[in-house]
Image (spheres, rainbow, N blue to C red):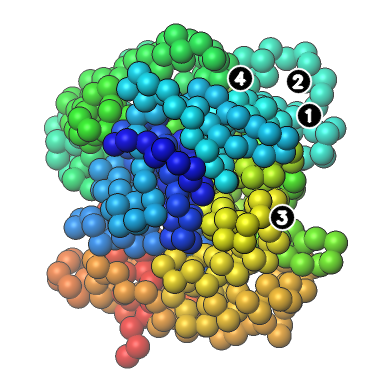
Amino acid sequence: MTLPSEAVDVLVWGGGTGGVAAAIQAARGGASTLLLTPGNWLGGMVSAAGVCCPDGSELTPWQTGLWGAFLRALEQAEPEGLDQNWVSCFGYRPATAEAILQGWVQELPKLKWVPGCKLLAVERQGSRITAVQLERRGESQWLACKVMVDGSDRGDLLPLAEAPFRLGWEAQELWGEPSAPSQQRLQTEAFFKQQPVQSPTWVVMGQLQSEVLPPATAPLPLAAPFERASEAFGLERTINYGRLPGGLVMLNWPLHGNDWHQGLERAFSADPAEQAALAAEMQSYSLQFARALEQASGGWLQLGHAFPAEAGSPAPWLAAMPYWREGRRLLGRSLVLEQHLLPLGSAESQGPLPLNACGELESIAVGNYANDHHYPGPDWPLAPKSIRWGGRWSGTPFCIPYGALLSAEIDNLLAADKAFSSSHMANGATRLQPLILNIGQAAGAAAALAVQRGIPPAELTPLAVQQCLLHDHRAPAAVVPLWDTPWHASDWLARQLQLLANPELLQANGQIGRPFQRPLSPSQGHPEPRESLWEGRVLPDGQGGYTFVSETDLSSDNAKREWPLISLEPGLNRWLQNLDKPTQAKLIGCANPWGPWLRASRLTAD
């Protein structure tokens, strides 16, 4: 594919999840858009990096925007369903995700995707980027643009554009983040120099040889240096952590598994040899881990074929790129801190709303991941932000303000992936696939609006971007965290707009105010391809957990069995919360034997 000879409206650099989302949304908004990626696949962590068990934004109120559209496309594309593992409510094959994204790209005449590019230089005139220099197939070329979007995992564009950025740890004294280390620790402890960012992982794919570990197989101890990898959950459950359709297994195991902790400063080196050495070490370590699991399981797990040759992977079982959890972070016009993620009250609350001096809401995306940092050694102690909801633990929601996507110095530069403006501590909750898809969507919407109005993105009001996202005809995206309004509710848009205009309806403690409450029906839910009818008793444990004793699965006449019961739907969750004794019920839901749990969406109407 050849590069264009004339200027484009929006130029998106990088093969990150947020990059492809930004490019899709900008082109859908009518802007001529060029997406440039270093690799052959364009989906970043949702496909090329093989992180195919998304965490966060699993509840139906948060399944909006491109994340929700992507999820529903996956439901249709995976015949075995997405209930495959226990780290996530969704598991899919990398090639399935990539096919969906490439299909979205190919249907847009305003969007051109060129893979196999190398970013060489950025031309900047004052507060604007005017062009970038690229190399492809040994030839270099300058490309001009009106709006520039960094859609890479590590903020590749920022140093070349001389856009101010942060990298690494920040002291607690700087912003008062409760989980940040003190300045003294940062200066005196070697750990912080050896571990400048969260540890990445090079995902390797395994293939199960049968549904369960054969009874005759006596698990062997895992070989060094992975001796302790299965001590918390046992070998079979450790392996099934990232199970995908077809018995594929995503090996991205944080507990003494294949996270890589050595020489991470090389990820940001200008020397290609240093980056290549880091990549080789990460790949080798993940393959060691896979072989250790294969040996310990007696061959039940073997290397799996998940990445076709066109993905550009080192091998069919190795991801095409590493899973970068953290990189350079833009110095933006707003900054997301850890305290912006923490709940204001108990129960169904959220982090503080980002309001401007006039009391207007500036949110352009909603996330809800708990917060999770990957380093060697014990877990890093983090301020809690999770609640028991629907029979499981879920993170309380938080908002990303529009200013966090904007460079403090460059008016036409937007960040669409993990490089948006956040602290190191906040990055542990903001780096996940669902939120990054919707941040990318917001960046693309802003880019298209800016081109349409003939102004740089920095001059757009948050309201203009919010209205664009809420009224999008393909993938409307929430900007307000509403616990009681799933994406499929008939009044979803009306309630989003009402709270956008009146953010004071969310009380100071984060609870939805009485005038804004509404009744929720446990029989209302979204139909799914593989759901079935279950009859039995629901047993509440009095602490937010539930067991379903199935008398029969009415779709298959299964024998009586006890299932942990979970739900992602607000209506059914409200019904469950009100139970104080065993209750007979007929549920519609999907069973996940590897969770194991029954994920119910609603009661039957009869």
> Of helix, strand and loop, which one carries label 2?
helix
Query: Label 1: which residue?
Result: 171
**Quadrant showing the N terminus:** top left
Mark pair 2, 4: CA separation: 11 Å
With 156 as the anchor, is 537 left or right in this view? left
Mark pair 1, 3: CA separation: 32 Å
Q: Quadrant of residue 466?
A: bottom right
With 552 as the anchor, is 319 left or right in this view? right
Q: Is residue 371 visible?
A: no
Specify few, some or many for label 4: CA neighbours under 10 Å numbering under 14, 14-19, or 20 or more.
Answer: some
Q: Is residue 1 visible?
A: yes
Please say if the residues under marks 2 and 1 sit with CB atoms less than 8 Å apart: yes
Mark pair 3, 2: CA separation: 37 Å
- Tag 1: residue type? Ala
Mark closest to the chain's N terminus, 4 or 3:
4
Query: Label 3: which residue?
Result: 459
Q: Residue at x 57, y 46 (%)?
A: 146
Q: Estimate the x, y position of residue 502 in percent, counting from the top left.
A: 74, 76
Please say if the residues under marks 1 and 3 sit with CB atoms less than 8 Å apart: no
Q: Residue at x 24, y 28 (%)?
A: 317
> Of helix, strand and loop, which one carries label 1?
loop
Q: Estimate the x, y position of residue 213 in percent, counting from the top left.
A: 20, 37
Q: Estimate the x, y position of residue 420 in percent, counting from the top left.
A: 62, 42
Nearer to us of marks 1 and 3 is 3
Nearer to us of marks 3 and 2 is 3
